[in-house]
Image: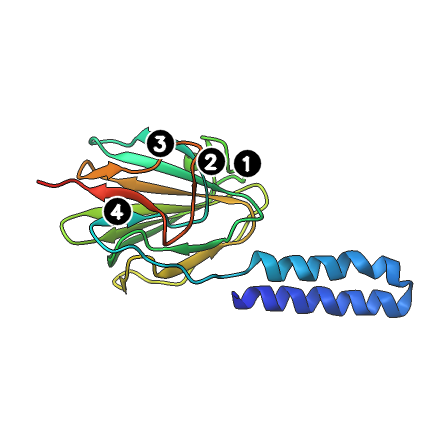
């Protein structure tokens, strides 16, 4: 459980109790339901991280696009709805080389334009003989991006690195040394689903 979920749940529970006391129990019910939803939304399950020369999904969700991304690279776009786990994980092991925050719009995150126009946090990880990037992208509802690491930090593959609150999108940027292992429409789980494998030389 992400600690934010407990704070939100306590706030909605307190508001519900106040409404119950001041008016009628029926009016408090939506607030109690919101408290339960926050506990569900901010869940943070353990994941089994696969071994080997693979890149894992940085987020739970649905693959909504696989597109070329300069210099023979590939961008994989993953859409997270409000029922997905929103904890983000490192796709590979390595060192955080860059963290670039960009202000932007709050378009529906499933749209292609969200990758370049929405508010986002672009992270670059320098691994062993490879560099992989991923972008935390705010959506129509998600307006809070959390990244818990700093430039220079070392991360393990599948390690928790942040959170996007409510519906959102995550893009993964892979170089030509990677062979894509997912398809558009496929659902993936952060930290455990393999999105690409290193090509053998």
* Secondary element at tag 4: strand
Q: CA distance from mark 2 to mark 3?
A: 14 Å
Residue depicted at 38% across the width and 50% down the height: 58
Asked which colour scheme the image uses, the reply is rainbow
Give residue 133's position: percent from left, percent from top.
29, 46
Q: CA distance from mark 3 to mark 1?
A: 18 Å
Residue that sits furthest to the left in the current view: 201
* Dot 3 crowding, Cα within 10 Å, few <14, some 14–19, many 20+: some
Q: Earlier in the sequence, mark 2 or mark 3?
A: 3
Q: CA distance from mark 1 to mark 4?
A: 25 Å
Give residue 174's position: percent from left, percent from top.
26, 40
Residue 146 in sight from this viewpoint:
no
Residue that sits furthest to the right in the current view: 23
Please indicate whether residue 193 sits to the left or right of residue 62 in the image: left
* Secondary element at tag 1: loop
* Dot 1 crowding, Cα within 10 Å, few <14, some 14–19, many 20+: some
Q: Which numbered marker is on residue 132?
A: 4
Q: Earlier in the sequence, mark 3 or mark 4?
A: 3
Give residue 78's position: percent from left, percent from top.
43, 40
Q: Earlier in the sequence, mark 2 or mark 1?
A: 1
Label 2, on which residue?
114
Q: Which numbered marker is on residue 17?
A: none
Give residue 113's position: percent from left, percent from top.
46, 31
Residue 64, by quadrant, is top left
Do the CB atoms of the residues marked 2 and 1 lie less than 8 Å apart?
A: yes
Q: Earlier in the sequence, mark 3 or mark 1?
A: 3
* Dot 2 crowding, Cα within 10 Å, few <14, some 14–19, many 20+: many
In which quadrant of the rendered image does the C terminus lie? Answer: top left
Residue depicted at 23% across the width and 37% down the height: 179
Q: Closer to us: mark 3 or mark 1?
A: 3
Label 3, on which residue?
66
């Amino acid at each position: 459980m992400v600690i934010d979920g407990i704070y939100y749940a306590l706030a909605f529970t307190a508001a519900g109790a106040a409404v119950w006391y001041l008016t009628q129990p029926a009016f408090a019910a939506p607030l109690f339901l919101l408290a339960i939803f926050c506990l569900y939304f901010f869940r943070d399950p353990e994941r089994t991280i696969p071994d080997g020369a693979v890149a894992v999904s940085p987020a739970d969700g649905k693959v909504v696009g696989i597109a070329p991304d300069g210099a023979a690279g590939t961008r994989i776009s993953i859409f997270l709805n409000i029922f997905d786990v929103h904890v983000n994980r490192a796709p590979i092991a390595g060192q955080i080389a860059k963290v670039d925050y960009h202000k932007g719009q709050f378009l529906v995150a499933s749209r292609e334009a969200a990758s370049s126009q929405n508010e986002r946090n672009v992270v670059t990880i320098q691994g062993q003989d490879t560099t992989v990037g991923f972008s935390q992208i705010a959506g129509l509802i998600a307006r809070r991006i959390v990244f818990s690491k700093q430039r220079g930090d070392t991360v393990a593959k599948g390690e928790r690195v942040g959170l996007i609150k409510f519906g959102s999108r995550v893009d993964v940027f892979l170089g030509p040394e990677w062979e894509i292992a997912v398809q558009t429409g496929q659902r993936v789980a952060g930290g455990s689903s393999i999105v690409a494998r290193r090509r053998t030389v």
